[in-house]
Amino acid sequence: MKQIKVGIIGFGTVGAGVADILLKNGDVISSRAGVELVLARIADLDITTDRGVKVPAGVLTTDADALIDEVDVVVELIGGKTVAKDFILKALNKGKMVVTANKALLAEYGKELFAAAEANNADIYYEASVGGGIPVIKALREGLAANHINSIYGILNGTCNYILTRMEQEGADFAPILADAQKLGYAEAEPSLDVDGFDTAHKAAILASLAYGEWFGLGPVYVEGIRNISQQDLAYADELGYRIKLLAIIKQTDGDVQVRVHPTLVPKSALLGNINGVFNGVFMEGDFLGPSLFYGRGAGREATASAVVADLVDVGLNLACGSVHRVPAFRAGKLYKNVLPISEIRSRYYLRLAVRDESGVLASIAEELSRRNISISSLIQHEVAAEDGTVPVIILTHITQEARIVDAISAIEQLPEVVGEVRRLRIEDI
Amino acid sequence: MKQIKVGIIGFGTVGAGVADILLKNGDVISSRAGVELVLARIADLDITTDRGVKVPAGVLTTDADALIDEVDVVVELIGGKTVAKDFILKALNKGKMVVTANKALLAEYGKELFAAAEANNADIYYEASVGGGIPVIKALREGLAANHINSIYGILNGTCNYILTRMEQEGADFAPILADAQKLGYAEAEPSLDVDGFDTAHKAAILASLAYGEWFGLGPVYVEGIRNISQQDLAYADELGYRIKLLAIIKQTDGDVQVRVHPTLVPKSALLGNINGVFNGVFMEGDFLGPSLFYGRGAGREATASAVVADLVDVGLNLACGSVHRVPAFRAGKLYKNVLPISEIRSRYYLRLAVRDESGVLASIAEELSRRNISISSLIQHEVAAEDGTVPVIILTHITQEARIVDAISAIEQLPEVVGEVRRLRIEDI
């Protein structure tokens, strides 16, 4: 049986998981794949801390450069965009195969890395970069290869989904739940990458690129995070039959593509509305396939390691067959017309306003919407007034253009009966 | 770009779908896969009926034998176990690659077909045989290759799921909904293959084989269909927080494997409990991956065609790389100890009894259960009596062994206060 020498650079959480799965499940891997993945080397600056994995003697090293020379496949699990990039380019330049989970690096420097792979007859696999254990990259590159992709809706960040789920279930606000999530290890001390939507944006950029045949980078990705979601928004959404999820939305309408990341009202009856806690889910619709959904753990040591090893199996099979670029890291081939700016997207909207409890206020608001051809699909006004004497009004609209709703909101905010800012969220009836 | 000549044998629903997708989405396929899938030939006895696809002149033929000689890949879409098998063997014996959706044939004659493929340096791909558009075969063979599979729960038959969903939503019994489903084309005139669970059993046999490394055939598969499910069962399940689904259950406990197909109570809160209508869903748990779920259309012209073309892309990539048996049709390698007979499985149970409204009846029933160490997790007895004066009692048990519940049921059926048979269903708290 063909032996493939695997070298891991970065012995952190996922690195330890990959070592663990290679050591524990070597029998299953050989049995199913017919190749033997040998854990040859692990490089890290710190090779003394116990990671809970018994690594055979001689595997650990601090010399990542030497590792690259000694193995067939380099698994980059350092993260970040500096050293990680250097090591990947070094490996590719030596014709080594690369497996990485580094979404930030791929989203930003994908073109450069893929060109290096192409030039050196090497491959880059990156299943673990999006959706952890969910095989969404493989699905887009292989399973759905015959489909025009109509839409992709993804819950791609476990931290945000965990926070939103707890806020909803406990009727709590963002700040205390974030603090608790940090204490429990579900959120980083510096949470911006997750809660401001950037991590989801990296993943959205990768999925959009695979779906539409151009490596977009982050340029076309519109991003809003979840910091401004209040417990009230979750409660009203619930009352109206929705949950709020941080979604990556990638879709084409009349050949134009939109790529956006923002908190979104999703029907409670939709499968995506029922993906809670740290789990991820990706809904994809192909023109022939129809709707499909993948669900699983989006992060964490073991699920991510499972995805990395799935890539290693692919690389191993390629090496065993002597084939390179069988499924290249990325095959360009434009499958869309234009990328829509956020102002031109069309959506349904949720608006939350604080109004003075005076007669005629709803008429004034409705008038501003109607003047811009925005029609209301439902409206809630409860009798309970806030401490400042205002009453909350919740409006759901039918589909309209983003630019129109923005315009309507600024007009509504000028109305004397409306207090403060209008809170606006988008709705997707998946 | 490498051209792959594709020949389809069987111009029925799926055959027409495959032709359609190759003709309409050739640009996407070439763009994503880097190979060109050319619709070279379609063979059928009837080449005059309009299938709604404009096939280029010269493609249609009645001569399937000649087709095999003229193409690189043979797509078998005749179905059944006689002619289909002959054509597949003929193709393999000529070293042609084969793609098929024929679960019945694979479940029963897989070993023979795979041996012919092996002997002739050819490949067989069969993604469309299970779960239609859901890439579950690829996931098991590639994406989850590094995982020991703890469990697979599948809703794999769209007809049964459609019938059960309508029964539940309309409060109707099996017979009238089946009749209507037949009128609407969702069920065959001869519905046994679907509603008696055999189709699901074929698919369960394939998934179990891939998960545990032995081509089982139908031998170890326990099968019950949905004919006996009544509107009452669905209503009581609903009251208790469950839906009833026809599930394929494949799991290992302490290294022993069980493969069974039967109607099952599934929590309404579980994702699998929310897969309704003609849709399919497969829940899989790997030791590293953790829980995952795939959802999509399980049948129908377009979704099945999408899966067939995904296989054609794989075959095309193999041919372009000159690699055969990269992922062989099946790689044996036993990953379990024994197959458990149904009497030895452990499960929770739902029991529905009709009892005379007399004092002491519940005590007698509880006594029979308790004597066999079966404990009750919930019990419903409503005041409403049936026409015959009996009262329905619903009991949910904790986990126990099948043999024990069978024994308890025969004892309970002997009790003078219990009228008729005890209705028994299994529960899975996924």
Image (cartoon, coloured by chain):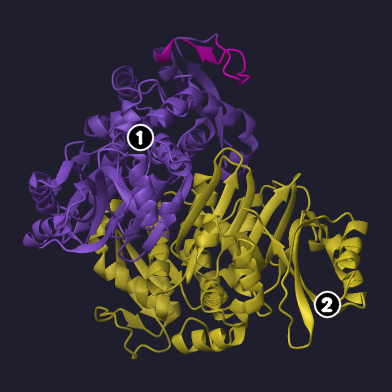
Chain colours: A yellow, B purple
SS at mark 2 in the image: loop
| Left or right: B377 as drawn, with respect to B312 | left
Instruction: Bin the neighbour count of mark 1 within 10 Å (Cα to Cα): few under 14, some 14-19, many 20 and up.
Output: many
Q: Residue B175, position in %: x, y?
A: 37, 29
Q: CA distance from mark 2 to mark 1?
A: 71 Å
Quickly name the residue at label 2: A357
Image spot of residue B216 (x, y percent): 20, 40
Type of amino acid at the residue the image marks with label 1: Ile
For image coordinates 53% across by 73% down, the residue present is A165
- Name the secondary structure under disc 1: strand
Q: Quadrant of residue B109?
A: top left
Identify the residue shown where x is 61% and y is 40%: A287
Q: Position of residue B402 (x, y in %)?
A: 14, 51
Does residue A34 lie above or below A259 as drawn?
A: above
Mark 2 burial class by Cα count in 10 Å: few <14, some 14-19, many 20+: some
Tell me the chief SS of the magenta region. Answer: loop
Toward the viewer: A122 or B375? B375
Three-letter amino acid code at the position of disc 2: Asp
Residue, disc 1: B124
User: Circles 2 and 1: CB distance less than 8 Å?
Assistant: no
The answer to which quarter of the image holds residue B224 is top left
What residue is drawn where x is 92% and y is 74%?
Answer: A415
- Magenta segment boundaries in residue numbering: B49-64
Say which chain tag 2 marks. A
